Image (cartoon, rainbow, N blue to C red):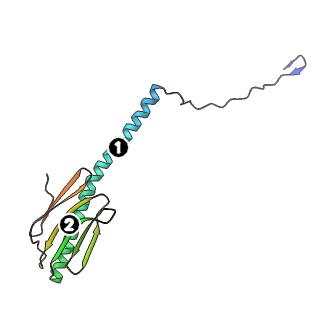
Amino acid sequence: MRRSGRIQTDDRRQRRPQPPRLDRFDPLWVTIAGLLVLGTLAGIGFWRGCHDGGAARQAALSFVCVIRDAQAYARANRRFVTLDISMRGLDHTTVCAASDGARTFIRRPLPDSVAAAGLIRMDEQGALVKPASILFRKGSHVVRLEVSQSGQVSFPAD
């Protein structure tokens, strides 16, 4: 197109579409952000609650394996055996240890932040001298392990 002897060009640049601006605190964005935060915190709390109970129960089950290994050692070597589960060291890790008086032949740490304490004594036949009850705790979850004099293990419901 010509007007007055000059060629007219289109100098307008095409603008890119801009992303929506989030610098304003619309009530909708505040509500969505609040729900996301609350949902995330609720999910983390639920997961930790499930995990705590499972970790305490798993620690009790691993201690049952230590009891069985100590009974087999007592029978095979005709020795008195002492099982001790307690917190040790500067980092307060719970360790279960089995010894026959002369040496410690089993030493296993429990998972992190699982607390337990107790003592079990066995005779040369692998039978317990007296029944024992040990509490395993992680967070608010507590698992009680009871061992009868014959060596039977139970997890009574409280």
- State left or right for residue 1 relative to residue 57: right
Q: Earlier in the sequence, mark 1 or mark 2?
A: 1
Query: Label 2 near label 1: C-beta < 8 Å?
Result: no
- Along the line of sight, which residue is nearer the eye, 109 or 29? 109
Up the image or down, 49 lies above or below 82; here it is: above
Residue corresponding to mark 2 = 64
What residue is rendered at 17% in x and 76% in y?
A: 81
How crowded is the residue under tag 2: few (<14 C-alpha within 10 Å), some, or many (20+)? Answer: some
What residue is rendered at 58% in x and 32% in y?
A: 19
Residue 38 on image: x %, y %? 37, 37
Up the image or down, 85 lies above or below 157; here it is: below
Q: Farthest residue toward the front?
A: 90
Residue corresponding to mark 1 = 43
- State left or right for residue 41 relative to residue 155: right
- State left or right for residue 120 relative to residue 103: left
- Indicate the amino acid at tag 1: Gly
